[in-house]
């Protein structure tokens, strides 16, 4: 059995953060596929009892430890490996600030937007999509401004804040109906910098379940 096991699925940008971190660390890990769209296992009482009471992916298993929330998983792996780790207490707080902003307002809106546009049947109410798109544009502009001023979110080195922020940003533009890298050029350049890190892989290559219906 691999050292780490990660409950995940290819379409999940939330799970991608943890999968990408494991791969960038060259960790010995294997995915456990969550049938999110078909059986919707994450909503079953069994999953909530045995895997994650919050009913979410990702979930990381490492020995006796079971961790959920990608920000917690990233923090755990950075502390353990010393890689992508903020270097002092101020940086740690700064990383947490961006991870929370990302979870709530950047990928926290992009994930549901893409789900409603691309996967939900019937697809989302146009008014809901318009509301989310407005918030997404504003929040991506904040990240874009930040990345105009520095190479990575905290400075000149990538940290877990950057890994968190990649969440949904590599999924194809057609799945959103807009092109994030083109509309926000500093984000586009930063995404290329992250893509150049050894061990980087696209979410559809890194996690099982793509294309849909092929598991
Ligand atoms: N903030 C959480 C978000 C996790 C999350 O929302 N995961 C989605 C999959 S992308 C999920 O499992 N949702 C449960 C559901 O919709 O039933 C994290 O970063 O880990």
Image (spheres, helix red, strand yellow):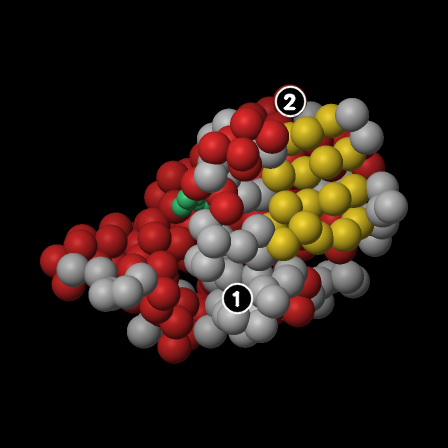
Q: Is mark 2 within 8 Å of ligand 1?
A: no
The residue indicated by pointer 2 is: 89
* Residue 194 quadrant: bottom right
185 or 102: nearer the eye?
Answer: 102
* Residue 185 quadrant: bottom left
Residue 172, image x and y in percent? 46, 73
Dots 2, 1 in contact, CB < 8 A: no
Residue at 31% x, 62% y is 120
Vertical relation: 164 (above or below) 74? below
Q: Secondary structure at mark 2?
A: helix
Residue 17, image x and y in percent? 60, 49
Left or right of 111? Residue 19 is right
174 or 188: nearer the eye?
Answer: 174
Left or right of 146? Residue 6 is right
Vertical relation: 202 (above or below) 158? below
Residue 170's tag is: 1
How many residues crowd mark 1 within 10 Å: few (<14), some (14–19), many (20+)?
some
Residue 63's tag is: none
How many residues crowd mark 2 within 10 Å: few (<14), some (14–19), many (20+)?
few
Residue at 57% x, 56% y is 9
Q: CA distance from mark 2 to mark 1?
A: 30 Å
152 or 173: nearer the eye?
Answer: 173
Left or right of 60? Residue 39 is left
Residue 23, image x and y in percent? 75, 55
15 or 165: nearer the eye?
Answer: 15
Left or right of 61? Residue 38 is left
Residue at 40% x, 67% y is 180
Q: Is mark 1 within 8 Å of ligand 1?
A: no
| Residue lying at the far top of the rendered structure | 89
């Amino acid at each position: 059995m691999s050292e780490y096991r990660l409950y995940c699925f290819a379409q999940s940008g939330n799970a991608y953060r943890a999968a990408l971190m494991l791969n960038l660390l060259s960790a010995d890990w294997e995915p456990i596929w969550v049938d999110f769209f078909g059986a919707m296992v994450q909503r079953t009482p069994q999953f909530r009892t045995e895997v994650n009471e919050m009913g979410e992916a990702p979930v990381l298993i490492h020995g006796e430890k079971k961790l959920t929330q990608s920000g917690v998983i990233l923090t755990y792996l950075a502390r353990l490996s010393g890689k992508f780790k903020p270097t002092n207490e101020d940086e740690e707080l700064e990383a947490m600030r961006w991870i929370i902003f990302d979870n709530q307002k950047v990928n926290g809106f992009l994930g549901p937007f893409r789900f409603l546009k691309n996967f939900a049947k019937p697809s989302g109410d146009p008014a809901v999509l318009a509301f989310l798109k407005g918030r997404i544009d504003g929040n991506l502009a904040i990240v874009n401004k930040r990345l105009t001023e520095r190479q990575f979110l905290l400075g000149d080195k990538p940290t877990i804040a950057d890994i968190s922020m990649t969440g949904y940003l590599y999924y194809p533009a057609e799945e959103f109906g807009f092109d994030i890298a083109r509309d926000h050029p500093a984000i586009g350049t930063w995404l290329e910098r992250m893509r150049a890190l050894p061990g980087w892989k696209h979410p559809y290559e890194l996690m099982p379940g793509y294309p849909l219906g092929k598991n």
